[in-house]
Amino acid sequence: MNYQESLKILELINKTKRVLINCHYKPDPDGIGSALAIYLALKKIRDFEIELICPSKLPESLSYLPNFEKIKQVNYSEFDFSKYDLWVIPDAANWWQISGILDFNPPKIDVINIDHHETNEIGFENSIISKGLSSASELIFNVFEDWNLEINKDIAMCILSGIIGDTGVFRYTNVTSRTLEIGSRLMNLGADKNMIVAKTYGSIPFNEMKFWGRILDLMQLEKDYNFVWVAISLEEYEKYGRPVEAKSASASNFASIVDRTNFGIIIVEEKKDFVTCSFRSRGSFDISQIAQELGGGGHKEAAGARIVGLPFEKAVDKVLEVARKYAKKTN
């Protein structure tokens, strides 16, 4: 048994008739892969009434996943949660990440939270939180193993997509021999690793590639604090067509690879007085502490935050002030 809570959660699921499954705000491969894996697993258990919802636009790069088209983009402030008995929330550590709403008022229905973020703050009774695990998808594989659930090709595709997405194709330090073993088992079950990698990392829209070039052009090195950073204004962001996935992708591709640095930050003004940040560590530096002080969260090597209510320049100054404080501690 991987988790003592697994059977209790299965018992709760089996008492349910109408299930809601969440894809978090601005979903990544792990967010979508884990949600779809749960959807397919519940369909194997029995005939539930299931709805898949997401508060923001879905990345087309993941449209190859089975049942991707069943995920509905909805406004959480208007959605009627009362129709459902249970809300399953994978890969989310707080209500902002779940809903994309700063003052979201959670509905009064049973919730299951399945998550791996070090900064998880939801704290529901019916949860499985394995902090520091490679991905929510790896966690879900372990849960399915506890349930003795037979994993078919479609479920394997969803889980492997999530693991590959959250580990940067198995290159982060939270990848263990168990992660690799699971990846191998999923491939043996029919998951197409090469296609997942090509879709996730090898199919970049042209405007996003141009945006990456602008990020590299504007990148600055903080020599005294051993990190790099980029700040993209709303004007620049709109000039390149507001590429939704570009911030996170460029952070993973560039912010964490500069020699003799500990981490990198990509800052984007997505709308007036609303700035989001992606942090990436080179491995030994815990970037989640910076994100958490700024009101965000995440993992040791990858985290995010948002600054609301400040003009662009002041928001950038605030991010850099906190980053320098923690960077200085490591010198």
Image: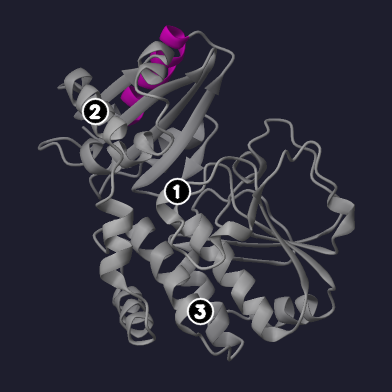
For disc 2, the neighbor class at 10 Å (few under 14, some 14 to 19, many from 20) is: few
**Residue at the extreme left:** 259
Q: Which contiguous range is marked in magenta?
A: 312-326
Say whether residue 280 is left or right of residue 24.
Answer: left
Q: Is residue 131 above or below residue 216?
A: below
Three-letter amino acid code at the position of disc 3? Asn
Q: Which quarter of the rendered picture does the C terminus lie within?
A: top left
Question: Which residue occupies 45% across, 70% down?
Answer: 159
Three-letter amino acid code at the position of disc 1? Glu
Work out whether mark 3 precedes mark 1 in sequence or the reverse, and give the earlier one: 1
Q: Quadrant of residue 309?
A: top right
Camera-near label (3 vs 1) is 1
Measured as percent of width and height from the top left, residue 120 is found at: 57, 51
Q: Which quarter of the rendered picture does the N terminus lie within?
A: bottom right
| Residue hosting label 2 | 210
Q: Is residue 219 above or below residue 254?
A: above
Viewer can see residue 90: no
Asked if the residue at tag 1 contacts the one at tag 3, i.e. Cβ–Cβ closer than 8 Å, the answer is no
